[in-house]
Amino acid sequence: MRRLTSVVRAVQRFTESRNRSKSLFLRNSGRKTAAHFSWNCSSLLALAALVLLGGCGEPQFSDAEKKTIASLALNTLPSLKPDTTNQYADVPAAAALGSTLFFDTGMSRDGTVSCSTCHKIDRQFQDDLPQAVGVSRTNRRTMPLAGVARNPWFFWDGRRDSVWAQALTPLENPLEQAGNRAAFAHYIKKRFGERYERIFGPLPDLSTVPASASPLGTDAEKAAWNAMPTGQQDDVNRVFANIGKAIAAFERSIEPEQTRFDRFAIDLATGAKPVGDAVFSPEEVLGLKLFIGKANCVTCHNGPRFTDNSFHNTGVPPVDGLPPDRGRVDAVAQVEADPFNCLGKFRDGDESACRELRFMVKDGPQIVRAYKTPSLRGAADRPPYMHAGQFATLGEVVAHYSKVPLAVEGVSEVHPLDLSERERAALVAFLKTLSE
Amino acid sequence: MASIWRYILAGLGLAALLVGIVAAVYLTLPQAASGPDISRSKKTANGLFVASFEPERGVVRQGELQSWLLTLKTAAGAPVEGAAITVSGGMPQHDHGLPTSPQATDYLGQGRYRIDGVKFTMSGWWQLHFGISAAAGSDSVVFNIVL
């Protein structure tokens, strides 16, 4: 319930003036806690004497552990950076239009599918299915969207490089919304023409644009597209890109929320005695220690979003019956070829925003069957797991990390941990604190 | 009266205990434990150049795409101009490469080259290898960065 109300809050936020000072405050208080915390460490020795005398049973963490725990807490999340590639990213009217489009089933071939069909607002913007179902069944699991605007790469394989370029993909994917960009341009003009023009300026003349046309569509749609003069193709592409930019402006308001883990971590950092649900059970403490220690989870699931935003082969097996899926290695060419990528002409601002694309790893064994490290915030509440829903429970996920089969292709970066049953249960107990 | 002295004595005993603990902790602290050589300035493998490698903005931030400066001098101290530089690297203990492909993007004068696109996605021991070709010849250097 709490989740639903705060999601609704996120949706409402774009109508309010953006509260930068608040996030700045949060960031600064994050710094301050780090300072307090080093003071605490020096007083730890004095405390040690007390512990010897009184035997007080507080869970103890080493300095290094405390530092790592502090780095995972949500209060270290910096404020959202402006997106210079999308000049409408922080324009409230654009976010409002984007929100309308996100929930509008009219934005699909047969009028039945919207972004929210799969990204459900009351389900952390995902759908609880192993593989998403739009116009047809897709080959991958729907990704939750909390904090999505902070990603450098989009999709499990990172085949898009901005929130706005990503949004254009499902709109034309035949398994998802199955539309085409000419039809979307006509639809925007008919349904939202005035709202669109107030944000983006005059719509182009669409009177001679075919009802259906796209370079990626059916043979008929491709033929119609190829018959269009270049200038007209550009006009339609521009409207299409603006649809993505409006939806992206909306998505920027979807942010992760504070959890029990964060309350625990802040108390640990400030030296306050945790009360209420910020108290961790011995099992949760053990799980946290494993996560940041022996089990090495934090090497990839790091920072306040529990992701390094990078791609790894973790030996997750493919799903029988789905087409071959090679992960990141096949995405490189796709993002390079995308006309809406950062280096393309639909980007606002200058090219200095495109360093992720410019400096991406393009080949090598390490990107074969590599997938993006997902955030673990909220994960306990949204099985199944992995890029095609391979595992039904967190227990199965942890069992995977404990055994790690050989990767079917490429080389797995994770090595079997051989965790005891107690340790596996503790890791699951800790992961649950990121959902409460 | 005697009881006060007893307290003071106990206090002294405790203080001594504390000093003992402090000393023990201090001695066992991992003081620059035998990790990799993390110097930011060194001779290249065959001694052709002296290379130094520093983050352009002074601080290393985990997870951020950053630019670094590679400064090249000859053994005699003259700046090395017009060098062709290749960059590779990874995490020796994790058996994986870099998460990005850094490149030498600009020459800034006085032997300074901007190496852009450097990102360290996790804490631990990273290595950056530079291949350097200039008028004086070709050489290489490895920098260790521990986060």
Image (cartoon, coloured by chain):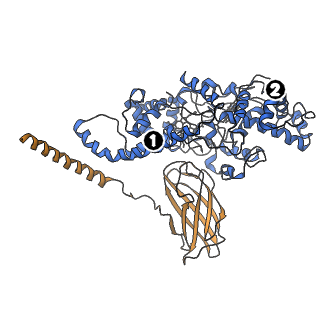
Chain colours: A blue, B orange
Are labels 1 and 2 assigned to the same chain? Answer: yes
For residue A401, side relative to residue A146 (left or right): left
Q: Quadrant of residue A106?
A: top right
Tell which subunit mark 2 falls on. A
Q: Residue at x 66, y 63 (%)?
A: B106
Q: Is residue A305 above or below residue A394?
A: below
**Amino acid type for the residue under numbered disc 1:** Ala
Q: Nearer the viewer, mark 1 or mark 2?
A: 2
Please provide percent x and percent y for residue A166: 71, 38
A46 to A143, vertically: above or below: below
Q: What's the CA distance linking mark 1 and mark 2? A: 48 Å
**Circle 1 sits in a helix, a strand or a loop, which is it?**
helix
From the top left corner, tell me how far across and down residue A258 is, in percent.
Answer: 51, 32
Q: Which residue is mark 2?
A: A191
Q: Is residue A293 above or below residue B82?
A: above
Where does the N terminus of chain A fall, quadrant-wise?
top right
- Which of the two residues, B70 or A294, is positioned nearer the viewer here? B70
Find disc 1 in the rendering and name its residue.
Answer: A70
Label 2 environment density (alpha carbons within 10 Å; few <14, some 14–19, many ≥20): few
Parent chain of label 1: A
Dot 2 amino acid type: Arg
Q: In the shown orientation, is residue A187 left or right of residue B90?
A: right
Please report the residue visible at 87 percent of the width from the left and 31 percent of the height from the top. A212
